[in-house]
Image: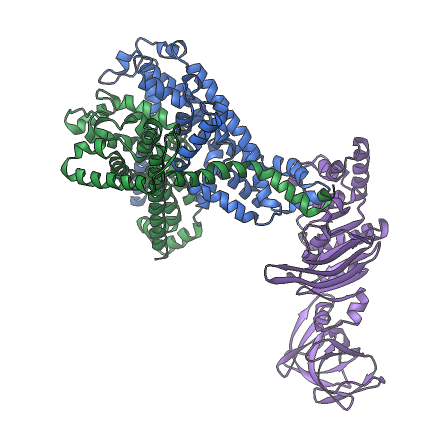
Amino acid sequence: MAILASKKNIERLTFILLIIYPFTLNAFFGYFSAVFSFWLSFYSWDILSPMKFVGLSNYYALFQELWRGLNLLFSDPNLLQFRAPFFNGLKNILVYTAIVVPTQTFLALMLALMGNQKIRGSQFFKVAYFLPATTCSVIISLIFMWLFEKDGFINFFIIPFTGGYRINWLNDPTYLLTAISLVAIWGTSGNFSVTFLSGLQTLPKEVYEAAKIDGASSLNRLIHITIPLLKPIIAYVVIMGLIGALQMFDLSYVMAGSSGGVGGAGYTITLDIYNTAFLQLRYGYAAAKSVILFLLIFSLSYYVQNKLRYYRHE
Amino acid sequence: MSVELKNITKAFGSTEVLKDVNIRIEKGEFFVLLGPSGSGKSTLLRIIAGLEEPDRGEILINGQRVNELDPSKRNIAMVFQNYALYPHMNVFNNISFPLKMRGVKKEEIISKVREVANLLNITHLLDKYPYQLSGGEQQRVALARALVRDPEVFLLDEPLSNLDAKLRVKLRFELRKLLHDQLGITTIYVTHDQIEAMTMADRIAVINKGALMQIGTPTELYEKPKNTFIATFIGTPSMNLIMARVEDNAIKVFGRRIIVRDKTRLPEGDIILGIRPQDIKVGEPSIARLKLAGEEKLGSGYILHLNFENSELLLYLERETAAVKGEFIPVLFDGPLYLFDSSTEELVTKIDNYEV
Amino acid sequence: MNRKLFNILKISGIYLVLIFFALVYLMPFIRSLFGSFMTWEQASYFPPQWIPNPMTFTNYLKLVEISLFPTWIINTAIYSGIIVLVNILTASMSGYAFASLNFPKKDLIFNTLLALLMIPPFVTLIPNFIIYVKLGIIDNLFGLAILSTANISSIFLMRQYYFSLGKELFEAARIDGANPLKAFFYIALPLGRPALGAISIYNFLAAWNAFLGPLVFLRSPENYTLPVGLSFAFSRSIWSDYGPIIAGSLIASAPTILLFVVLNKYLIRGIVIRASKG
């Protein structure tokens, strides 16, 4: 009881009591697992047989695969998925990210700027735009697969522009990744536009009033005041979008299947990690791939963050 | 209950906020901790409450060391500057909370809350929530919550500073009447307002930059300030400080000699001469003729700003003078003179009897 | 006059674009709603038709008759329920502890937890799967739920919320005789209600929509949650045609849609907090 009577100890014991569960859980399934993953990447293991230390050979195999993929890209791209799936996934996800992140950021910003005007029904627009973000990505994919059918709803609106040609979105390697990207943009841009909108509403009104008095046109106010003041939020949206896009899994898994669909056109890094681990049971190799994914995400978002910060100080 | 602080020292990072503070507060005393903001007075109060821990030193309540006791076990009550009323509880539940935490029986809680609500005239507010109350009402609820369990020591952290001026003056008087005259609780009251301190306290401890400057009754602090900080901090307008010299046991100021009639020997050399604005008069035989720089009307009196050399002399008058700005007016000293050491700024001596 | 005309044109233009995009975002839901009552022949007819003719409930009936769909609803509800309830506790408890209790190096401990947000789920997925296999709790809904019961963003949000309340309230409670644990139950928990509401919604959406975790950790169809179940049913062509998939998707997304339409103000406020931290 003497321990309990002391003020210091009461507080410390309570602190430990209150955080012990979340702390242990996250330390174990977060930090321990992250370290375990790194450690595992130096082993060859299928869970059932004993672990075998293989040194850097997982990474060696990985870079061989990347090199092979790079060569095939120019000589025989049809073999990519078959002979260098990790490279194919990497290539696809980079293309996908390059399409999705700028488009959704621009679209979100544009919608937010318009929604920020003094108009009636802005709450309705917010709800409408945000709704896809609250809906499960698997469900979204399933609905869109129906809409993307050759004789489907979307083609009906497209044929006036293609001269009657109906695109076979999901079964044509040229269009599969585009279809997935469109679904992703549809699913997240509304979410980010609400982020922008709440950012816009925190901007100081005085600055705009001052600019109006100084005679700045609305276009000038947008370019010289709104955009620069929004830079931190733009950076946030770009980085969040980047992190999400590089790890895209659900849409490809449902819309293209775990093998990446026709010609592996919808294959991603995360699908490759999933397959390597849970279908081929090569856990060590999969862990090495996840380490590379982590480095990719970390360095890209770090790079973007620095670049955007640089602009802000300009 | 008495409260005793021994060698209390506390630092936040590398900044020392309390340096070796020793205070003894007697049972039933209304004790004020006075100091400018950032002086460490609030930290001292929070150390007594147990919300902060001293780096060194002891806190004794009624002779018992309480350093290790949790705030909940110290039997102290505290009123916070922003009252800290629980926003999700109505007034009744706010006041009864300390009793509930101590496992007091329901009937007793009800009668105690009624009693203290009666005492503070807030019976009609018991069903309301804090956000429905005015500042003054919130203040009384906070007091009631602190009083309801008959604490041994009562701590108040600038409890009046969020109220408007009129209410502040009224509550100043009522607080002392209630806590000291009626209930006789040992009270420690933190404020930066010297008028509040002077009007309410039995004794005041003046704290500056983490160090205890002086402890004493309001009269002692006013009449025998230990150093120039206290001399200028207490009393409005502030005491005038004038650079002067002592030669042959006489003070040389404004080119005149003030001869001390007391038997004390004065230290020779540079000194700081202090005199309160109330103790300077206009008239002859003057010690100097000084230029009138301006006048402030206080309603009850007038403050004259007089220039000499590069500094200013303040003078408090009850009646307006006929003098106009720029005019040279004759002044004479009519009250005690304070001599401070020119380097340590400590009081050397106070002179009541002198001749110009 | 000119200026007025310009303004009217500008506002109409903005409305046109906003309504166009609202249609783009809402159309898949609307189209599914109509389509779910159609026969598959009609639903896949080109050009698209709008009015179900004949109106049929076969798609919905098939969900109940030929599949584990009802079981998946119950599983998802249990899984989300556990995650929401436990996260309310863990987030409020540790948020309060990190915000207002003294502990050596507590900010370091907190930042260590926060740094975990930078690690992609795919990095920890494989080790966690292996741990679960070794512990023998693979293919177990409750076991899977445990992984999501101490959400770090929620803890962060609660910590910020308690900071914003100011420390005086908790100090007052301590002086009033409440020990740190009582101060939590009497002051912090009831005061945390608005923030806990937002946290509940977020965790509910995340759990209800979760795919990767359930896909990897659940093995037998009777343990599936809705997203895994629907994706499984689709890839195995359980219902032979696509109609029930659409109907099932609508039912599966109904709770999140309803929740969002009713509580959208809460959610959108939550984004402001998140955006301003980043």
Q: Is residue A218 visible?
A: yes
Left or right position of C134 against C37:
right
Please count the marks in the image. Answer: 0
Between B287 and C135, the residue placed more toward the observer is C135
Q: Quadrant of the C terminus of chain A?
A: bottom left
The residue depicted at 50 percent of the width and 24 percent of the height is C142
Between B107 and B197, the one lying in front of the other is B107
Residue B318: x and y, percent? 76, 71
Chain C drawing hue: blue
Q: Which chain is purple?
A: B
Residue A65 shown left or right of residue A114 in the figure: left
Determine whether B251 is above or below C234 in the image.
Answer: below
Q: Is residue A25 left or right of residue C101?
A: left
State the colouring used for the structure image. by chain
The picture quadrant where one finds residue A80 is top left
- Up-down relation of residue C93 to residue B199 (above or below): above
Q: Residue at x 43, y 39 (%)?
A: A36
Q: Is residue B166 visible?
A: no
Quarter containing the N terminus of chain A:
top right
The vertical placement of A219 against C130, above or below, is below
> Residue C186 at x, y = what percent?
66, 36
Q: Which chain is green?
A: A
Q: Is residue B23 above or below residue A26?
A: below
Q: Residue at x 61, y 45 (%)?
A: C100
Q: Quadrant of residue B192?
A: bottom right
Q: Position of residue A89 (x, y in %)?
A: 27, 35
- Residue A246 position, x and y percent, is 33, 38
Residue A286 occupies quadrant: top left
